[in-house]
Amino acid sequence: MPSPTTSPASLLHALRRVMRPLVRLMLRKGVTYPYFADMLKAIFVEVADGEFRLDKAPPSDSRVSLLTGVHRKDVKRLRGQLETESEQLPEAISMGAHLVSTWLNTPPFCAAPGQALPLPRLASIGGDRSFDGLVRSVSTDIRARVVLDEWLRLGVVEIDEADLVHLSTNAFVPQQGFDEKVAYFGHNVHDHACAAVHNLTTEGSPLFERSVHYDALSPASIQQLRSAVSTDGMQALVAFNALAASLETRDAESAEPRQRMTIGLYFYTEPSAAAQPADTPGDAKP
């Protein structure tokens, strides 16, 4: 069994790099090392218990201890506390994403796929083509006013002077609300990491995971790229969303097992330690 002394140095270096922003987040939010270490110990046991079985039989406490390095007494205690964590977004956020997708892709709420129309707030004014009608088309268990108030708080929608409701973003990404942002953080980072780990550890076709990176751009160029990603990247995501919505409708008649998927796009920038202005004395590029 590999140990830290036999694991590839490149992997250990990459893990340190991956962990730094997570540790930064924990320190800013008051998550201490002892708490995180105990949580991490439980995750090691959980993954070993669920994903490293022989002939589908649960591994013994001794085997989990051997795999993880966690003491056998702790393994026994932690296995009794294991909780099944849902891979789905919380119900309120999932329903919100469904509403936004319907607004973007389903007549009479859109002018064309990806082009959400401003909607009269009340059904008494707009009939079925209203915000009331949108919510009712997805769920009859929740009042449109409740959704509207929450979306106004999160910055998902705006209301103009004519009492029309406008979608403020082309995806259900809250502008406010820490818990909502954390839900997407867990979902998106988890799925991105799973795609990357799949490509490192699984034989067969790799999952799509690509990026472009430069380290000698000016602030003006960074801003130009950021704007391009915001515009063109969102258009790509809206197109993928429309395709996924149409495929899900088609698949509703199929008896095949269901799968979930995530398509993501991100942009990040920070000062480059390696790059210097071209006219700096001694500057050279390979």
Image (cartoon, rainbow, N blue to C red):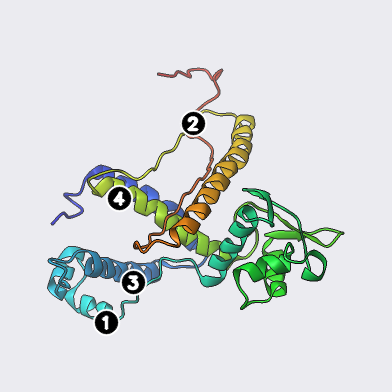
Which residue lies under the disc numbered 3?
38
Is mark 1 in CB contact (under 8 Å) with mark 2?
no
284 w.r.t. 63: above or below: above
Q: Amino acid at mark 3?
A: Asp
The residue drawn where x is 38% and y is 67% is 36
Q: Residue at x 16, y 54 (%)?
A: 2
Where's residue 19, x and y in %?
A: 39, 54
Mark 1 vs mark 2: in front:
1
Q: Is residue 8 visible?
A: yes
Q: Are marks 4 and 2 in contact (CB under 8 Å)?
A: no
In the rendered structure, the answer to whether residue 238 lies left or right of residue 167 reads: left
Q: Amino acid at mark 1?
A: Gly
In whole angstroms, how far apart are the C-alphas of marks 3 and 1?
A: 15 Å
Q: Which residue is mark 1?
A: 80
Q: What residue do we see at 57% from left, 65% from top?
A: 180
Q: Secondary structure at mark 1?
A: loop
Q: Nearer the viewer, mark 3 or mark 1?
A: 1
From the viewer's perspective, is the residue at label 4 or at label 3 nearer? 4
In the image, residue 130 sits, relative to residue 218, either above or below, namely below
**Which is closer to the viewer, label 4 or label 2?**
4
In percent of width and height, residue 59 lies at: 15, 71
- Earlier-in-chain disc, 2 versus 3: 3
Pick the residue in front: 199 or 143: 143
Of all residues shown, which one is farthest toward the front?
253
* Residue holding disc 2: 215
> Label 4 vs label 1: CA separation?
29 Å
Q: Nearer the viewer, residue 161 or 213?
A: 161
For residue 227, above or below residue 3: above
